[in-house]
Image (cartoon, helix red, strand yellow):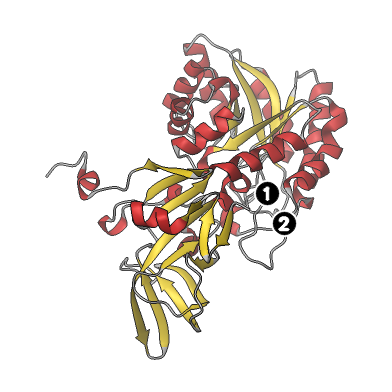
Amino acid sequence: MNYEYRNRRLCVEGVELSQIADQCGTPTYVYSAGMIRERYHAYANAFSGMPSRVCYAVKANSNLAVLSVLAKEGAGFDIVSGGELFRVLRAGGKASNVVFSGVGKTADEIRYAIKQGVHSFNCESYAEIEVLNRVAGESGKTASVALRVNPDVNPVTHEYISTGLKENKFGIDMSVIEQAYAHAASQPHLKVTGVSCHIGSQMLDSAPMVEAVERLLALVMRLKASGLPIDHIDLGGGLGVKYQDNEETPSIPDAVASMRKVIESSGLIAMVEPGRSIVAEAGVLLTKVLYRKNNGGKEFAIIDAAMNDLLRPSLYKAFHDVVPVIESDKLKMEVDLVGPVCESGDWIAKKRSLPTLESSDLLAVKTAGAYGFGMASNYNSRGRAAEVLVDGDTFKVVRERESWEDLVRGESA
C-alpha cells in the first residue's frame, strides 16, 4: 500500500506525512513516485504484445518531477499547450513521444512544436488544419496530423468534463469528419496519419469508451479504403478513479482489455492519453486546522488549504475524502472544512464525520494528485502550496512554497 497507517500515523511509501508537514509546512501537495510508476505500467503492460503508446496527459499534473518519473519509465506525453511541451522537454521527455492536442493552439505554439519535432498533432477544426499547414510550410516541414472526432457518445460524467457530445467545443462532428479528412489530406504540408477522440474525464464505466472506439474503427476502415495512410488510433483518456467508497471503476487492465478486443486485429498503433488515473490517487494535500468555529450549531474547521489550493470542490462540487494524519480516538463530529479565502464557495469538504478537531491538527485530502496544484491560483494574494515527491523512504521538495515576493515578481507599481 502506498498510503496506509502505521503506528497510527498516515504514511506514504516509507515516509510519515507528519514528518513532511513538520519539515515543509502546510498546505503541501505530496505525491508517491511508486504509485505513479505502478499506474503507468498498468497501462503499458495491458497493451503488451501489440503496437501501442501510453501518452500521459500533462494537464493532470505538470510538475517537472512527476514528468521526469514518467519519462524515465518510457512514457509518451499528451500536451495541450506550448508551455506543457516546454515542461516535458525540461523534464527529460522526448518530443518524438509527444502528441499535441487541444482546441486552441496558437501559431507560435505550433511553430515551437514543429521545431522540436513532436510526433503528431490532433487537430480539431478546419481553421486549425489550415494554420497547421501554413506554419509547417513556413518551417519547411511536413506535420503528421490526426483529426479529433466528436463521436457524440455520452461519457456519463460531470457536464464540465464531458467532451464527446455535439454540444461540446471539442473535435469535429462525425457527420462531416470524412470531408474534413479529405481537406486535411489536400494540404501540401500535412500528412494524415491518425484518428483521435476523447469523450470525457472521470468515467466510471468503460462502455462509453468502447462505443467510441467502435465508431472510430469503422471510420478508420472507410478512410483507409479511400487511400489515406492511417497508422494509429488515439483513444484519448478519461478513465475515472475512486473518490468515494461507493464508487466503482474498472481497473486499468480491464478497461484496456475491453478496448483492445475491438482494435487489436486492426494492426493500428493504439495510443491512449491517461492522466487522472495515473496521478490522482498518488497525491494528497496536507493541511492544518487553524480554528474551530460554531455558527448557530453548525461546526466549521477553518483550515490553511483553500479553494485557491484545491479548486475542484468549489468548481465541480467534487468530493475528496479527508482523513486525519494521526489517528485519534476522540469523539466524532460533523464538520465543514473551509478555507481562509473570502468566498462562501471556499470549502474543501462538507458534512464530514471526523474525530473532534483542534487547532494544529493535520489532515490529508486524498486523491489530490490530479487537477490539484495545476488549477491552483494566487487568489486573495495567497502563495501557492509546496509540492513534495516521495520515493521509497525519502522525500524531496519539488516545488518551493511561494513567498510574498514571488507574488509580485514581474509586477511594477
Q: Quadrant of the C terminus?
A: top left
Viewer-nearest residue: 275 or 385: 385
Is disc 2 surrounded by few (<14), some (14 to 19) or many (20+) residues within 10 Å? Answer: some
Which residue, given by chain and number where applicable, does mark 2 sit on? 249
Is residue 235 visible to us here?
no
Residue 329 screen position, x and y as percent: 51, 79
Residue 368 screen position, x and y as percent: 51, 55
Which residue, given by chain and number where applicable, does mark 1 sit on? 239
Give me the C-alpha separation between circle 1 and circle 2.
Answer: 8 Å
Secondary structure of the residue carrying tag 2 is: loop
The residue shown at (76%, 25%) is 51
Residue 214 screen position, x and y as percent: 82, 40
Viewer-nearest residue: 203 or 227: 203
Is disc 1 surrounded by few (<14), some (14 to 19) or many (20+) residues within 10 Å? Answer: many
Is 6 on the left or on the right of 255, as rendered? left
Residue 296 screen position, x and y as percent: 38, 91
Q: Residue 16, relative to residue 188: is it above or below?
A: below
The residue shown at (45%, 35%) is 64
Q: Using the rendered view, name the quadrant where residue 44 is placed.
A: top right
Q: Is disc 1 in contact with disc 2, using a CB cutoff of under 8 Å?
A: yes
Is 88 on the left or on the right of 410, as rendered? right
The residue shown at (49%, 22%) is 113
